[in-house]
Amino acid sequence: MKRFSKVVVAGVLAASMVLFAGCSGGNNNADGDKDVNANAESQESNVLKVGTNAEFAPFEYVNEEDGTTIEGFDIDLINAIAADQGMTVEMENMEFDGLIMALENGSIDVAIAGMSVDPKRAKQVDFTETYYDAGLNIAVAIDDDSIASEEDLAGKVVTAQQGTTGANKAMELQEAGVVADVKLLANINVCMMALANGEVDAVIMDIPVNNRYVAAHPDEVKIAADIVAEEPEQYAIAVAKGNTELLEKLDAGLANVKEDGTYDALIDKYFGAAE
Ligand code: GLN
């Protein structure tokens, strides 16, 4: 399909940019404008420094064969948006709970990481329009029939990824005296390992990511229940607070890729039929 060639070209350009992209350090300048300058420079050279946490399939993950290429829905989406706006992408893989700080100190321009818009984050960074509706659910070991709802987490040990909305939910259930204990871990793979080892009884994680893991490991884990939330969780792209110029470009690019069919093609590519 024609749309995809655009995405592929952006990916190739992004890959080649990495070869001669300079170091992005030097943020601790006494001059408070330094960060703004760093952003402006990288945008002038049309290279967008994009941070993600590539442990969140199908949104972002490391290609298993080469062990280095970062792929996924979010990666194709940001490449398509960047290409639409005449920019190329340089990816940086980091911990999820370091992304907001990296935006604040200017070491990245953009974070795309299945990041849900929430009021606390919205005070620290600016979000584009949302691009995906998610939410949380509960995964358990395949042979565990004791959990069929959120209430059934009573007395259980629960894990979630630190710094995420799933972690907030787990802590909330602990504070409410429901779950017995919470173990916050670095990413879904270690959460699932803790489940397999019997260290925890349940994994609270984003629905599309838990579902993808379950689909890939159908003999080990299953989905027990959805977490019923008052507000739906929605993913958006984050930029440093006040970086309006970049935010406007990203919103324009997002609107364009939604309109020209690229977005739907990516939904199809990563989730089968449009969801
Ligand atoms: N959507 C969740 C959040 O924003 C989890 C994101 C992630 O782990 N990449 O907190």
Image: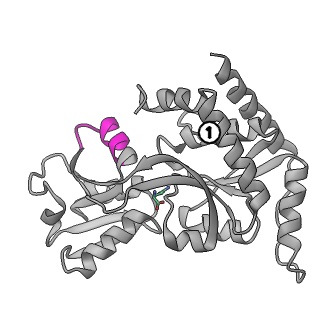
Give percent across and percent down for residue 174.
26, 77
In percent of the image, x 74 and y 58: which residue is there? 109
Comparing 252 with 180, the one in front is 252
Where the C terminus falls, by quadrant? top left
Q: Secondary structure at mark 1?
A: helix
Is residue 165 visible in the rendered image? The answer is: yes
Where the N terminus falls, by quadrant? top right
Above or below 148: residue 167? below
Going by the numbered disc 1, the residue's amino acid type is Leu
In percent of the image, x 84 and y 58: which residue is there? 23
In the displayed structure, does residue 216 sit left or right of residue 104? Answer: left
Residue farthest along the left direction in this orientation? 146
Mark 1 crowd level (few <14, some 14–19, many ≥20, 10 Å Cα): many
Give percent across and percent down for residue 77.
62, 39
Above or below 155: residue 17? above
| Quarter of image, res 65 | top right
Give percent across and percent down for residue 36.
84, 68
| Quarter of image, res 230 | bottom left
| Quarter of image, res 9 | top right
Residue farthest along the top direction in this orientation? 1
Above or below 247: residue 200? below
Give the main secondary structure, helix, strand or loop, of the magenta stretch. Answer: helix
In percent of the image, x 40 and y 50: which residue is there? 134
Is residue 69 visible in the rendered image? The answer is: no
Residue at the disc numbered 1: 77
Q: Which residues are magenta?
A: 210-220
